């Protein structure tokens, strides 16, 4: 059996351009370094929080800051990258005078799970820009999107918009192709939602989950299982690998902020992946990829995964 392609070998034929290939190599190098830092963080004194709150109003973990600094370090070495938008930076960071590309990232999503050693990840989105003024683009204009999942193994999951590939990091620091052309099954009986928020949900979300809980005798006509890891990368990776639906809908508590999850560096790259794998990614009322951002930290409701399940809740929103 021939050895799996390395990321660089795969990019030689799969990347739309040498510049994009180089940007993915830059991002992958940052993710590989972050994965290495996370592996021994607890005994390196890197666990725990800083005394700083980010623009999201969340207390920054040391590893949020370290991961963001690692992204910046690697991005500064790639002259094609002009702008960095990061969950951990209040404003877009100007990197190069030319460049032509921007990266939007959540350097370490789900960091509240680090203290209990649960899979977390880095989420990234790549956009073409002429200047910083171009940064607010709908997800449909992304040139690439993906994430690294730091779990039992470190996975890099990537799409240029038409298919999804998965790479696993070796002990030699090289990502090798694990799966290509990943497909999300249209049907599923597994849903992911923070059920403790039931009292805040709108009627459509309550109806959808009630149908699932009703099982075989309910409107859904089948038995469901529920999973909620509390780490978007971990929940989405499961859905990409075996189907399911992830829901963080707008609710009465998140309404004022526009939702819980961020559009440019969480919802849009995940929506690109899920749609490229044959799934659906919705706000409940329309495609996430069609939403025009009004700010780099805009929040949005996120419902994505198996196409049949997303269609069922969208039908409930139309009622
Ligand atoms: P809750 C992590 O903080 C995160 O942004 C996502 O990774 C995750 O899906 C969600 O929030 C969890 O939210 O309300 O269950 O804590």
Image: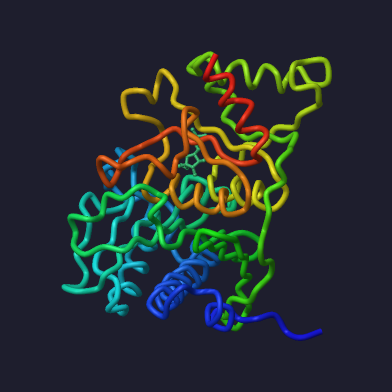
Residue 104 in the image: state x and y as whole percent: 35, 57
> In the depicted view, which residue is nearer to us: 120 or 63?
120
> In the depicted view, which residue is nearer to us: 220 or 286?
286
Q: Residue at x 49, y 36 (%)?
A: 302
Left or right: 222 with respect to 275?
right
- The picture quadrant where one finds residue 254 is top left
Q: How many marks on residues?
A: 0
Left or right: 79 with respect to 310?
left
Q: Residue at x 31, y 63 (%)?
A: 128
**Where 169 falls versus 243 (above or below)?**
below
Residue 2 in the image: state x and y as whole percent: 76, 86
**Where 107 falls versus 73 (above or below)?**
above
Which residue reaches farthest bottom? 2
Residue 28 in the image: state x and y as whole percent: 48, 72
Is the N terminus in the top left, top right, bottom left or bottom right quadrant?
bottom right
> In the depicted view, which residue is nearer to us: 315 or 10?
315
Residue 107 in the image: state x and y as whole percent: 40, 58
Q: Check the image and tell me how it is coloured.
A: rainbow
- The picture quadrant where one finds residue 262 is top left
Is the C terminus in the top left, top right, bottom left or bottom right quadrant?
top right
Left or right: 189 with respect to 234?
right
């Amino acid at each position: 059996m021939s050895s799996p392609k390395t990321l660089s070998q795969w990019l030689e034929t799969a990347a739309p351009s040498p510049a994009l290939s180089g940007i993915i190599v830059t991002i992958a190098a940052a993710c590989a370094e972050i994965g290495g830092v996370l592996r021994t963080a607890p005994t390196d004194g890197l666990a725990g929080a800083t005394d700083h709150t980010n623009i999201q109003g969340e207390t920054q973990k040391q590893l949020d800051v370290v991961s963001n600094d690692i992204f910046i370090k690697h991005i500064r070495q790639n002259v094609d990258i002009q702008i960095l938008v990061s969950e951990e930076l209040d404003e877009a960071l100007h990197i190069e005078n030319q460049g032509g590309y921007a990266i939007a990232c959540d350097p370490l999503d789900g960091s509240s799970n680090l203290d209990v050693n649960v899979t977390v990840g880095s989420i990234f989105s790549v956009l073409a820009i002429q200047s910083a003024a171009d940064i607010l683009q709908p997800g449909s204009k992304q040139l690439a999107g993906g994430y690294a999942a730091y779990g039992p193994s470190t996975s890099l999951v990537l799409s240029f918009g038409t298919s999804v590939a998965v790479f696993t990091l070796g002990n030699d620091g090289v990502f090798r192709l694990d799966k290509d052309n990943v497909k999300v099954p249209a049907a599923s009986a597994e849903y992911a939602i923070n059920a403790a928020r039931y009292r805040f949900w709108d009627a459509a979300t309550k109806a959808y989950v009630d149908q699932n809980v009703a099982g075989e005798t309910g409107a859904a006509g089948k038995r469901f299982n529920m999973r909620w890891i509390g780490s978007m990368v971990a929940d989405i990776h499961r859905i990409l690998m075996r189907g399911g639906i992830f829901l963080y809908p707008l609710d009465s508590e998140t309404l004022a902020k526009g939702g819980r999850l961020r559009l440019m560096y969480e919802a849009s790259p995940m929506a690109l992946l899920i749609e490229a794998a044959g799934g659906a990614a919705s706000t409940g009322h329309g495609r996430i990829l069609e939403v025009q951002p009004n700010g780099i930290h805009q929040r949005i409701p996120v419902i994505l995964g198996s196409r049949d399940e997303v269609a069922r809740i969208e039908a409930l929103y139309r009622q």
